[in-house]
Image: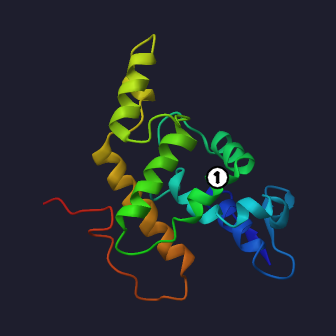
Amino acid sequence: IVIDATDTDCYAQASAIAKLIRGPLAMKRKDKMISCHLLCSTNVAEVMIQFHTMTECDANSGLYGHGKSSIYEKIEKVPQLRSLIKNVRGELPLSDNTRKLMKALVIEAIYGDSKYLIPGEARAAKWRSLKKKSTLRLSPDDDTLNHYCERANFLSYIQLYPEIYNHPSTIGNGWMLFD
């Protein structure tokens, strides 16, 4: 199978799927063919869908100033972070325990703060440590992180369980209607 796409969302999905299927799976990028089996390690492939929904997939806003590659390197090197990501199984509704684990993952893996695992404390500590005060690099507040985790969890759910044709509504799962 050859996938012809340039979007990074396709690369993330293909790298996860390649480890699950037998046979060749490749992506065409400009004039090159890339083997999807080589895009990521087996360890990361197990959590690629969850990793991707939490790090700037098109349907979930990213966390400013934190690129996928730097977070990917942390996830690849630290087994504890991969085990945290494995807990994002797309259960609906999102349980309090999974939400807590997702918040800890964002604060630790993305913002690099393992000392403070409560969003408000991590945000305050980061603010105090900044020499040049800017809100752009602060970790999200608790309310923002709740919505972010709900969206990532829902997106993981619909991608981890493609055999389910009638998925629940996005409303109440990280999205809401205004007016």
> Residue, x 39% and y 53% (percent of image)?
148
Q: State which quarter of the image contains the N terminus.
A: bottom right
Q: In this view, does 51 lie to the left or right of 129?
A: right
Query: Residue shown at 43%/50% (left/top)?
Result: 103
Is residue 125 positioned above or below 57 on the image? above
Q: Residue at x 60, y 40 (%)?
A: 67
Q: Position of residue 69 (x, y in %)?
A: 68, 43
Q: Is residue 173 left or right of residue 31?
A: left
The residue at the far left in this view is 179
Q: Quadrant of residue 159?
A: bottom right
Scheme by which the image is coloured: rainbow
Q: Sort mark 1 into few (<14), some (14-19) or many (20+) by Cα contacts within 10 Å.
A: few
**Is any part of residue 7 visible from this angle?**
no
Q: In this view, does 91 lie above or below 28?
A: below
Numbered label tally:
1
Disc 1 marks a residue whose amino acid type is Gln
Residue placed at 32% from the left, 39% from the top?
141
Q: Where is residue 21 in the image (x, y as percent from the top left)?
A: 78, 81
Q: Looking at this view, is 30 or 176 the one in front? A: 176
Q: Where's residue 10, x and y in %?
A: 65, 63
Between 161 and 89, the one lying in front of the other is: 89
- Is residue 42 visible in the rendered structure shown here? yes
Q: Is mark 1 on a helix, strand or loop?
A: helix
Position of the C terminus, as image quadrant, is bottom left
Position of 20 compared to 178: left or right?
right
Q: In this view, does 75 lie to the left or right of 125?
A: right
Q: Which of 23 and 150 lies nearest the eye of the viewer? A: 150
Considering every residue shown, the one lying at the far top of the view is 131
Residue designated by label 1: 80
